Amino acid sequence: MSSEIIQSQNLLAKSGKVGVLLVNLGTPEATDYWSMRRYLHEFLSDRRVIETPRWLWWPILNLIILTVRPGRKGKDYDIVWNKEKNEGPLKTITRSQSEKLADMLKKSLGEKAQSVVVDWAMRYGKPPIEERIQALLDQGCDRVLLVPLYPQYSAATSATVCDHAFRALMKMRWQPTVRVAHPYYNDPVYIDALVSAMKKDLAKLTFEPEKILVSFHGVPESYIVKGDPYYEQCRVTWQMMREKMGWPEDRFMMSFQSRFGTEEWVKPYTDETIKGFAASGVKSMAIVAPGFTADCLETLEELDGENRHYFEEGGGENYAFLPCLNDRDEGMNVIETVVMRELQGWL
Ligand SMILES: C=CC1=C(C)c2cc3[nH]c(cc4nc(cc5[nH]c(cc1n2)c(C)c5CCC(=O)O)C(CCC(=O)O)=C4C)c(C)c3C=C
Ligand SMILES: [Fe+2]
Ligand SMILES: [Fe+2]
Protein backbone atom coordinates (compact mmCIF):
# COMPACT_ATOMS: atom_id res chain seq x y z
CA MET A 1 0.00 0.00 0.00
CA SER A 2 1.40 3.42 -0.88
CA SER A 3 2.36 5.79 1.91
CA GLU A 4 -0.23 8.31 0.66
CA ILE A 5 -3.03 5.79 1.22
CA ILE A 6 -1.76 4.95 4.69
CA GLN A 7 -1.64 8.69 5.39
CA SER A 8 -5.29 9.06 4.38
CA GLN A 9 -6.22 6.14 6.69
CA ASN A 10 -4.48 8.00 9.53
CA LEU A 11 -6.43 11.14 8.72
CA LEU A 12 -9.71 9.24 8.88
CA ALA A 13 -8.76 7.66 12.21
CA LYS A 14 -8.00 11.11 13.63
CA SER A 15 -11.25 12.67 12.39
CA GLY A 16 -14.69 12.65 14.01
CA LYS A 17 -14.53 15.84 16.03
CA VAL A 18 -16.84 18.82 15.74
CA GLY A 19 -15.50 22.35 15.34
CA VAL A 20 -17.41 25.42 16.49
CA LEU A 21 -16.22 28.62 14.86
CA LEU A 22 -17.49 31.92 16.25
CA VAL A 23 -17.13 34.63 13.60
CA ASN A 24 -17.42 38.36 14.08
CA LEU A 25 -16.81 41.27 11.75
CA GLY A 26 -13.16 42.15 12.28
CA THR A 27 -11.04 45.03 13.30
CA PRO A 28 -7.78 46.67 12.14
CA GLU A 29 -4.45 45.30 13.39
CA ALA A 30 -3.38 48.77 14.56
CA THR A 31 -4.62 52.35 14.35
CA ASP A 32 -1.93 53.80 12.06
CA TYR A 33 -2.81 54.93 8.55
CA TRP A 34 -1.61 51.81 6.69
CA SER A 35 -3.18 49.29 9.07
CA MET A 36 -6.46 51.20 8.88
CA ARG A 37 -6.21 51.41 5.12
CA ARG A 38 -5.61 47.65 4.77
CA TYR A 39 -8.63 46.87 6.96
CA LEU A 40 -10.96 49.36 5.28
CA HIS A 41 -9.79 48.22 1.85
CA GLU A 42 -10.69 44.59 2.59
CA PHE A 43 -13.99 45.52 4.24
CA LEU A 44 -15.17 48.05 1.68
CA SER A 45 -14.15 45.89 -1.30
CA ASP A 46 -16.65 43.25 -0.22
CA ARG A 47 -19.56 43.22 -2.68
CA ARG A 48 -21.88 42.04 0.06
CA VAL A 49 -21.14 45.27 1.93
CA ILE A 50 -20.98 47.73 -0.97
CA GLU A 51 -23.31 46.88 -3.84
CA THR A 52 -22.42 49.92 -5.97
CA PRO A 53 -21.22 48.83 -9.45
CA ARG A 54 -17.44 48.26 -9.40
CA TRP A 55 -16.61 50.76 -12.16
CA LEU A 56 -18.19 53.48 -10.03
CA TRP A 57 -17.06 52.24 -6.62
CA TRP A 58 -13.37 51.64 -7.50
CA PRO A 59 -12.43 55.35 -7.95
CA ILE A 60 -14.58 56.45 -4.99
CA LEU A 61 -12.92 53.87 -2.73
CA ASN A 62 -9.34 54.19 -3.91
CA LEU A 63 -9.13 57.89 -4.69
CA ILE A 64 -11.33 59.36 -1.98
CA ILE A 65 -12.30 57.05 0.91
CA LEU A 66 -8.96 55.27 1.35
CA THR A 67 -7.05 58.54 1.37
CA VAL A 68 -9.13 60.30 4.02
CA ARG A 69 -10.92 57.70 6.17
CA PRO A 70 -7.95 55.65 7.49
CA GLY A 71 -6.48 58.68 9.29
CA ARG A 72 -9.79 59.92 10.66
CA LYS A 73 -11.05 56.51 11.81
CA GLY A 74 -7.62 55.56 13.18
CA LYS A 75 -8.03 58.42 15.69
CA ASP A 76 -11.47 57.07 16.66
CA TYR A 77 -10.04 53.57 17.14
CA ASP A 78 -7.31 55.09 19.36
CA ILE A 79 -10.03 56.15 21.80
CA VAL A 80 -11.42 52.62 22.27
CA TRP A 81 -8.21 50.59 21.67
CA ASN A 82 -7.31 47.91 24.23
CA LYS A 83 -3.81 49.20 25.02
CA GLU A 84 -2.91 46.25 27.25
CA LYS A 85 -3.51 43.68 24.50
CA ASN A 86 -2.84 46.12 21.66
CA GLU A 87 -6.00 45.24 19.78
CA GLY A 88 -9.54 46.46 19.13
CA PRO A 89 -12.15 45.65 21.81
CA LEU A 90 -14.12 43.52 19.36
CA LYS A 91 -11.17 41.13 19.17
CA THR A 92 -10.62 40.99 22.95
CA ILE A 93 -14.29 40.26 23.59
CA THR A 94 -14.71 37.70 20.79
CA ARG A 95 -11.64 35.77 22.03
CA SER A 96 -13.04 35.77 25.54
CA GLN A 97 -16.45 34.58 24.28
CA SER A 98 -14.73 31.68 22.54
CA GLU A 99 -12.69 30.73 25.63
CA LYS A 100 -15.70 30.96 27.92
CA LEU A 101 -17.85 28.94 25.52
CA ALA A 102 -15.21 26.16 25.48
CA ASP A 103 -15.31 26.05 29.30
CA MET A 104 -19.09 26.05 29.38
CA LEU A 105 -19.30 23.19 26.88
CA LYS A 106 -16.81 21.20 28.95
CA LYS A 107 -19.17 21.50 31.90
CA SER A 108 -22.41 20.85 30.05
CA LEU A 109 -21.17 18.08 27.73
CA GLY A 110 -18.93 16.17 30.13
CA GLU A 111 -16.90 13.49 28.27
CA LYS A 112 -18.44 14.43 24.92
CA ALA A 113 -16.72 17.82 25.17
CA GLN A 114 -13.48 16.06 24.18
CA SER A 115 -14.82 15.79 20.66
CA VAL A 116 -15.64 19.52 20.39
CA VAL A 117 -13.11 22.21 19.48
CA VAL A 118 -14.12 25.88 19.86
CA ASP A 119 -12.33 28.61 17.95
CA TRP A 120 -12.98 32.15 16.66
CA ALA A 121 -12.27 34.15 13.53
CA MET A 122 -12.91 37.51 11.91
CA ARG A 123 -14.47 38.14 8.49
CA TYR A 124 -12.02 40.99 7.82
CA GLY A 125 -8.50 41.10 9.22
CA LYS A 126 -7.17 38.52 11.67
CA PRO A 127 -7.57 35.72 12.56
CA PRO A 128 -8.94 34.89 9.10
CA ILE A 129 -11.77 32.40 8.64
CA GLU A 130 -9.83 30.14 6.25
CA GLU A 131 -6.90 29.82 8.68
CA ARG A 132 -9.16 28.88 11.60
CA ILE A 133 -11.20 26.37 9.55
CA GLN A 134 -7.91 24.71 8.55
CA ALA A 135 -6.84 24.69 12.21
CA LEU A 136 -10.08 22.90 13.10
CA LEU A 137 -9.52 20.32 10.36
CA ASP A 138 -5.95 19.79 11.56
CA GLN A 139 -7.34 18.96 15.00
CA GLY A 140 -9.59 16.25 13.53
CA CYS A 141 -12.84 18.16 13.00
CA ASP A 142 -14.79 16.78 10.06
CA ARG A 143 -17.90 18.79 10.96
CA VAL A 144 -17.86 22.54 11.46
CA LEU A 145 -20.55 24.77 12.93
CA LEU A 146 -20.16 28.36 11.76
CA VAL A 147 -21.64 30.86 14.17
CA PRO A 148 -21.90 34.35 12.65
CA LEU A 149 -22.12 36.53 15.76
CA TYR A 150 -25.03 38.58 14.43
CA PRO A 151 -28.44 38.08 16.06
CA GLN A 152 -30.14 39.71 13.04
CA TYR A 153 -29.30 38.36 9.58
CA SER A 154 -28.07 40.68 6.86
CA ALA A 155 -26.37 39.82 3.59
CA ALA A 156 -23.77 42.46 4.56
CA THR A 157 -22.78 40.51 7.68
CA SER A 158 -24.00 36.89 8.03
CA ALA A 159 -24.01 36.02 4.31
CA THR A 160 -20.51 37.31 3.72
CA VAL A 161 -19.23 35.05 6.54
CA CYS A 162 -20.72 32.06 4.70
CA ASP A 163 -19.43 33.24 1.29
CA HIS A 164 -15.95 33.52 2.69
CA ALA A 165 -16.01 30.21 4.53
CA PHE A 166 -17.25 28.40 1.43
CA ARG A 167 -14.58 30.11 -0.70
CA ALA A 168 -12.05 28.48 1.63
CA LEU A 169 -13.84 25.14 1.32
CA MET A 170 -13.75 25.38 -2.47
CA LYS A 171 -10.01 24.76 -2.31
CA MET A 172 -10.32 21.60 -0.22
CA ARG A 173 -10.29 18.03 -1.45
CA TRP A 174 -11.90 16.77 1.77
CA GLN A 175 -14.39 19.32 2.94
CA PRO A 176 -15.88 19.22 6.42
CA THR A 177 -19.66 19.01 6.73
CA VAL A 178 -20.83 22.51 7.52
CA ARG A 179 -23.75 23.93 9.46
CA VAL A 180 -24.48 27.62 9.92
CA ALA A 181 -26.20 28.90 13.06
CA HIS A 182 -29.57 30.48 12.42
CA PRO A 183 -30.09 34.16 13.33
CA TYR A 184 -31.47 34.37 16.86
CA TYR A 185 -33.15 37.80 16.77
CA ASN A 186 -36.42 36.40 18.23
CA ASP A 187 -35.04 33.70 20.49
CA PRO A 188 -36.61 34.12 23.95
CA VAL A 189 -33.22 33.32 25.52
CA TYR A 190 -31.66 36.26 23.65
CA ILE A 191 -34.52 38.63 24.48
CA ASP A 192 -34.44 37.58 28.16
CA ALA A 193 -30.68 38.14 28.25
CA LEU A 194 -31.03 41.62 26.76
CA VAL A 195 -33.79 42.60 29.13
CA SER A 196 -32.09 41.20 32.20
CA ALA A 197 -28.76 42.90 31.39
CA MET A 198 -30.58 46.14 30.60
CA LYS A 199 -32.49 46.07 33.90
CA LYS A 200 -29.25 45.52 35.83
CA ASP A 201 -27.51 48.37 34.00
CA LEU A 202 -30.44 50.75 34.44
CA ALA A 203 -30.58 49.95 38.16
CA LYS A 204 -26.99 51.20 38.50
CA LEU A 205 -27.87 54.65 37.12
CA THR A 206 -28.40 57.66 39.37
CA PHE A 207 -31.26 58.86 37.14
CA GLU A 208 -34.30 57.37 35.46
CA PRO A 209 -34.03 57.91 31.69
CA GLU A 210 -37.00 59.62 30.04
CA LYS A 211 -36.12 57.85 26.77
CA ILE A 212 -34.40 54.55 26.03
CA LEU A 213 -33.14 54.28 22.50
CA VAL A 214 -32.46 50.87 20.92
CA SER A 215 -29.85 51.51 18.26
CA PHE A 216 -29.00 48.95 15.55
CA HIS A 217 -26.27 49.26 12.93
CA GLY A 218 -27.89 50.61 9.75
CA VAL A 219 -27.80 49.35 6.18
CA PRO A 220 -28.76 51.13 2.95
CA GLU A 221 -32.54 51.19 2.45
CA SER A 222 -32.07 49.66 -1.01
CA TYR A 223 -30.75 46.41 0.57
CA ILE A 224 -34.04 45.99 2.43
CA VAL A 225 -36.03 46.78 -0.73
CA LYS A 226 -34.08 44.00 -2.48
CA GLY A 227 -35.18 41.49 0.16
CA ASP A 228 -32.75 41.63 3.08
CA PRO A 229 -34.74 40.68 6.23
CA TYR A 230 -32.46 42.75 8.49
CA TYR A 231 -34.82 45.65 9.18
CA GLU A 232 -37.72 43.36 10.06
CA GLN A 233 -35.55 41.20 12.33
CA CYS A 234 -34.32 44.32 14.17
CA ARG A 235 -37.91 45.50 14.52
CA VAL A 236 -38.95 42.15 16.04
CA THR A 237 -36.06 42.21 18.53
CA TRP A 238 -36.99 45.73 19.61
CA GLN A 239 -40.71 44.85 19.79
CA MET A 240 -40.08 41.74 21.91
CA MET A 241 -37.84 43.71 24.30
CA ARG A 242 -40.46 46.45 24.54
CA GLU A 243 -43.26 43.99 25.31
CA LYS A 244 -41.16 42.33 27.97
CA MET A 245 -40.43 45.69 29.62
CA GLY A 246 -44.03 46.90 29.19
CA TRP A 247 -42.83 50.28 27.97
CA PRO A 248 -44.70 52.46 25.43
CA GLU A 249 -43.27 53.05 21.94
CA ASP A 250 -42.56 56.71 22.63
CA ARG A 251 -40.31 55.84 25.56
CA PHE A 252 -38.54 52.77 24.17
CA MET A 253 -37.64 53.67 20.59
CA MET A 254 -35.71 52.07 17.74
CA SER A 255 -33.11 53.76 15.50
CA PHE A 256 -30.23 52.94 13.13
CA GLN A 257 -26.67 54.20 13.39
CA SER A 258 -23.36 54.29 11.48
CA ARG A 259 -24.67 55.71 8.20
CA PHE A 260 -21.96 55.66 5.53
CA GLY A 261 -21.95 57.42 2.14
CA THR A 262 -24.66 59.45 0.47
CA GLU A 263 -27.37 56.81 -0.05
CA GLU A 264 -30.50 56.74 2.12
CA TRP A 265 -30.11 54.23 4.97
CA VAL A 266 -32.83 52.67 7.09
CA LYS A 267 -34.43 55.20 9.40
CA PRO A 268 -34.82 56.76 11.87
CA TYR A 269 -31.15 57.67 12.20
CA THR A 270 -29.72 57.41 15.72
CA ASP A 271 -27.86 60.74 15.64
CA GLU A 272 -30.88 62.67 14.35
CA THR A 273 -33.17 61.01 16.89
CA ILE A 274 -30.84 62.01 19.73
CA LYS A 275 -30.50 65.57 18.48
CA GLY A 276 -34.31 65.65 18.25
CA PHE A 277 -34.64 64.46 21.87
CA ALA A 278 -32.34 67.23 23.08
CA ALA A 279 -34.09 69.85 20.94
CA SER A 280 -37.48 68.86 22.34
CA GLY A 281 -36.31 69.24 25.94
CA VAL A 282 -35.55 65.63 26.89
CA LYS A 283 -33.00 65.83 29.71
CA SER A 284 -32.12 62.17 30.29
CA MET A 285 -31.75 59.13 28.09
CA ALA A 286 -30.11 55.72 27.84
CA ILE A 287 -28.96 53.93 24.72
CA VAL A 288 -28.60 50.19 24.15
CA ALA A 289 -27.34 48.29 21.08
CA PRO A 290 -28.72 44.71 21.00
CA GLY A 291 -27.51 44.00 17.44
CA PHE A 292 -23.87 44.06 18.51
CA THR A 293 -22.68 40.87 20.22
CA ALA A 294 -19.59 42.69 21.42
CA ASP A 295 -18.73 46.29 22.16
CA CYS A 296 -16.68 47.84 19.40
CA LEU A 297 -15.93 51.12 17.68
CA GLU A 298 -19.58 51.56 16.74
CA THR A 299 -20.80 51.33 20.32
CA LEU A 300 -17.89 52.65 22.40
CA GLU A 301 -16.92 55.59 20.21
CA GLU A 302 -20.09 56.33 18.24
CA LEU A 303 -22.78 55.68 20.85
CA ASP A 304 -20.88 56.39 24.05
CA GLY A 305 -18.80 59.24 22.58
CA GLU A 306 -20.15 61.02 19.52
CA ASN A 307 -23.86 60.66 20.28
CA ARG A 308 -23.41 61.52 23.96
CA HIS A 309 -21.80 64.73 22.72
CA TYR A 310 -24.80 65.53 20.46
CA PHE A 311 -27.19 65.03 23.36
CA GLU A 312 -25.22 67.17 25.80
CA GLU A 313 -24.49 69.85 23.22
CA GLY A 314 -28.24 70.11 22.54
CA GLY A 315 -29.05 70.65 26.24
CA GLY A 316 -29.44 67.03 27.46
CA GLU A 317 -28.09 66.43 30.96
CA ASN A 318 -27.92 62.70 31.70
CA TYR A 319 -26.86 60.20 29.04
CA ALA A 320 -26.11 56.54 29.70
CA PHE A 321 -24.66 54.04 27.28
CA LEU A 322 -25.55 50.48 28.29
CA PRO A 323 -22.88 47.94 27.31
CA CYS A 324 -23.51 45.03 24.94
CA LEU A 325 -24.00 41.47 26.18
CA ASN A 326 -20.31 40.77 25.50
CA ASP A 327 -18.88 37.89 27.56
CA ARG A 328 -21.13 38.55 30.53
CA ASP A 329 -23.14 35.59 31.90
CA GLU A 330 -26.25 36.74 30.01
CA GLY A 331 -24.36 36.96 26.72
CA MET A 332 -22.58 33.64 27.18
CA ASN A 333 -25.86 31.93 27.96
CA VAL A 334 -27.20 33.12 24.59
CA ILE A 335 -24.15 31.88 22.67
CA GLU A 336 -24.15 28.53 24.47
CA THR A 337 -27.89 28.05 23.81
CA VAL A 338 -27.49 28.81 20.10
CA VAL A 339 -24.48 26.47 19.80
CA MET A 340 -26.06 23.59 21.74
CA ARG A 341 -29.20 23.80 19.61
CA GLU A 342 -27.25 23.75 16.36
CA LEU A 343 -25.04 20.85 17.50
CA GLN A 344 -28.02 18.52 17.97
CA GLY A 345 -27.46 15.21 16.23
CA TRP A 346 -23.75 15.86 15.87
CA LEU A 347 -22.61 14.77 19.32
C1 LIG B 1 -20.50 50.85 4.19
C2 LIG B 1 -21.27 49.91 4.42
C3 LIG B 1 -21.48 49.21 5.68
C4 LIG B 1 -22.54 48.36 5.93
C5 LIG B 1 -23.67 47.99 4.99
C6 LIG B 1 -22.36 47.87 7.26
C7 LIG B 1 -23.22 46.99 7.90
C8 LIG B 1 -23.02 46.46 9.17
N1 LIG B 1 -21.90 46.55 9.98
C9 LIG B 1 -22.11 45.91 11.17
C10 LIG B 1 -21.23 45.80 12.25
C11 LIG B 1 -20.07 46.57 12.42
N2 LIG B 1 -19.58 47.54 11.57
C12 LIG B 1 -18.43 48.07 12.08
C13 LIG B 1 -17.65 49.05 11.52
C14 LIG B 1 -17.82 49.55 10.25
N3 LIG B 1 -18.90 49.40 9.41
C15 LIG B 1 -18.66 50.00 8.18
C16 LIG B 1 -19.48 50.01 7.05
C17 LIG B 1 -20.66 49.25 6.88
N4 LIG B 1 -21.22 48.41 7.77
C18 LIG B 1 -17.34 50.59 8.27
C19 LIG B 1 -16.67 51.33 7.15
C20 LIG B 1 -16.83 50.30 9.54
C21 LIG B 1 -15.43 50.64 10.06
C22 LIG B 1 -15.40 51.87 10.81
C23 LIG B 1 -15.62 53.06 9.91
O1 LIG B 1 -14.79 53.28 9.03
O2 LIG B 1 -16.65 53.70 10.08
C24 LIG B 1 -18.16 47.40 13.34
C25 LIG B 1 -17.02 47.73 14.31
C26 LIG B 1 -15.69 47.07 14.01
C27 LIG B 1 -14.65 47.38 15.06
O3 LIG B 1 -13.48 47.16 14.81
O4 LIG B 1 -14.93 47.80 16.18
C28 LIG B 1 -19.15 46.46 13.53
C29 LIG B 1 -19.28 45.47 14.67
C30 LIG B 1 -23.42 45.35 11.09
C31 LIG B 1 -24.06 44.54 12.21
C32 LIG B 1 -23.98 45.70 9.86
C33 LIG B 1 -25.29 45.40 9.25
C34 LIG B 1 -26.15 44.58 9.59
FE1 LIG C 1 -20.58 48.26 9.83
FE1 LIG D 1 -19.36 54.41 13.13
Image: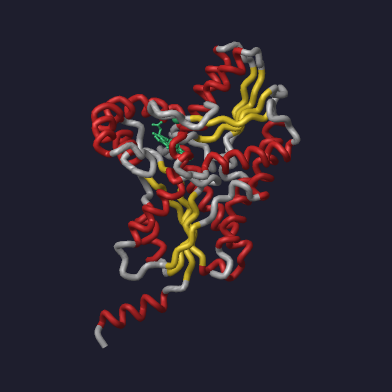
- Pick the quarter of the image with the N terminus: bottom left
Q: Residue furthest front?
A: 225
Residue 324, placed above or below residue 96: above
- What colouring does the structure picture have? secondary structure
* Residue at horizontal 60 percent and vertical 57 percent from the top: 104
* Residue at horizontal 63 percent and vertical 15 percent from the top: 317
Left or right: residue 291 compared with residue 161: right
The spot of residue 111 in percent (x, y) is: 59, 70
Left or right: residue 329 compared with residue 78: right
Number of dots carrying numbers: 0
- Give the quadrant of ligand 2: top left
Answer yes or no: is residue 157 visible: yes
Q: Quadrant of residue 2?
A: bottom left
Answer yes or no: is residue 82 visible: no
Q: Residue furthest bottom?
A: 1
Residue 297, placed above or below residue 193: above
* Residue at horizontal 54 percent and vertical 57 percent from the top: 102
The spot of residue 17 in percent (x, y) is: 47, 69
- Give whichever of 99, 315 is nearer the camera: 315
- Give whichever of 186, 297 is nearer the camera: 186
The spot of residue 238 in percent (x, y) is: 63, 38
- Give whichever of 112, 41 is nearer the camera: 41
Q: Quadrant of residue 165?
A: bottom left
Left or right: residue 8 compared with residue 120: left
The spot of residue 225 in percent (x, y) is: 47, 39
- Pick the quarter of the image with the C terminus: bottom right
